[in-house]
Amino acid sequence: MTAKTKQMSPVDSAWLHMEEPTNLMMITGVSLLDAPPDFERFRKTLQVRLLTLDRFTMRVVEPVLPVGTPHWEADPNFDLDAHIHRVALPAPGDMAELQRLISDLASTPLDFSKPLWNIHLVENVAGGAAMVLRLHHCIGDGTAMNAVLFRLMDMARDAPIGEVEEPATEAPKPRDFVSTVFKPVRSIGNALRYLAHEGSESLRHPSRIVEGAGAAAEAASIVGRVLLMSPDRETPFKGPLGVQKRVAWSNNVPLSDVKTVTKALGAKVNDVMLSALAGGLRDYLLARNADVSDLEIRAVIPVDLREPQRGIELGNSFGLVFLSLPLSIADPVQRLRETKKRMDAIKQSIEAVTFYSLLSLFGVTPRQVEEQGLNIFGSRATAVVTNVRGPGQALYIAGSKIENIMGWVPQAGHLGLGVSIFSYDGKVSVGVITDAGLVPDPEQITAAFRVRFDELLSIATAPG
């Protein structure tokens, strides 16, 4: 490999080769802005802050022989303007129109002859604007995309283009933001060292796993248990996939309200959000006369495995865990307690590390073997659910204030339902992406989620 080429890691290769017309391995995020940014300033911001990351100027090249992993190659024809698209919503320019646009973008593959990312600047969005970033999963995971977004952001509307500042937060601690300010762009990796990872709850980290026969036996047991799982029951969420996707997002939930629930009911933030999601999915199925008696559906949850001192880097450094969501439980408090119990058990497992190792193995196997393996594990689940904690205060990009951030994850293994929980500036949003042929109305899921969260909040704040 030369300075203009880099070998792709086995895990990144695995995510690259999961790409299918009906299930694009692409992370999609949107930032809602209070006004359209100055385009020249925005373009300069990308040039200064983004293009210093080599994967944003490199394309993917497959090996000549059907063995080995692909490599990154500097795109000799790279043109930044080919990755920036300026569009405007048709009247009335409301959130429904934006939802339709993002649904179309989430259904459209990236151009594999170029670096695998692009940005749409959207004007006429409810009096403001939006920035839609699409990034192929082989470039990086949700944590990496979070870091990329933050790299483009400023703490002030008039911040210099050549500087990046860290949002002020609480005292430094593992898996949290640091409170200091880092100005040079080149230090962004250190500045983001404690950026919150996918899944706001820390699971047992690989550095603390006991090595040797005990860990190997536990890993083998985990794989065997998953292989012995019966496939998830057929529901409206499962079935053959089509090309067209649908996206939706919830109304914002104040993070202070979430913490009110956690304090009153003795749970973690992740427990509360997952329990409200389970309640919303239950409501969606009941509205379609589906049988929810004894129903559990498994969610595949990414868990970041980066050591805090490694900082934030591109690429994929996460494992997967299987969480059974108890949709059969009608009582909201019982459902929350059961969700917490299951999450607590996962936190003591090395399941995430085990499946990271499997992804590494899939990345160096022939495509047919990888696909069969993913299908085996994918049939055991119904959804992918991620939880990413973003900046805790309002930030700016190219002079425009970022009002809110949402995102949507790809669904590997032929899954038709993806849920992303994202917090920003003291509020939490839930984004849902579905296969249009299975669930044409994901906004019904986000609305039901909010109803079930408000139910928990009402219980938590009830007198006595």
Image: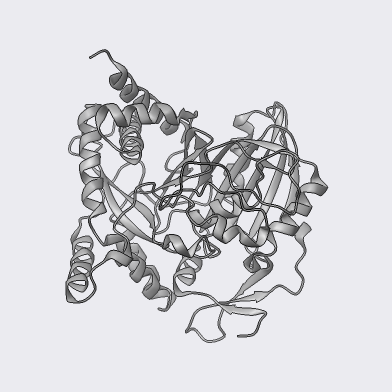
| Above or below: residue 282 compared with residue 386 | above
Looking at the rendered structure, the number of numbered marks drawn on it comes to: 0
Residue 183 x, y percent position in the rendering: 66, 53
| Above or below: residue 366 compared with residue 300 | below
| Residue positioned 28% across, 55% down in the render | 380
Quarter of the figure with residue 112: bottom right
Could one spot residue 134 in this view of the protein?
A: yes
In this rendering, would 153 be left or right of 384? right
Residue 347 x, y percent position in the rendering: 26, 52
| Residue positioned 20% across, 31% down in the render | 334
Colour scheme shown? one colour
Q: Quadrant of the C terminus?
A: top left
Q: Quadrant of the N terminus?
A: bottom right
Could one spot residue 292 in this view of the protein?
A: no
Residue 47 x, y percent position in the rendering: 75, 58
Quarter of the figure with residue 265: top left
In depth, the one of 445 and 127 nearer the eye is 127
| Residue positioned 48% across, 83% down in the render | 68
Residue 228 x, y percent position in the rendering: 18, 61
| Residue positioned 65% across, 64% down in the render | 56
Q: List the single residue furthest toward the top.
A: 463
Q: List the single residue furthest toward the right.
A: 40
In this rendering, would 363 be left or right of 152? left
| Above or below: residue 277 compared with residue 302 | above
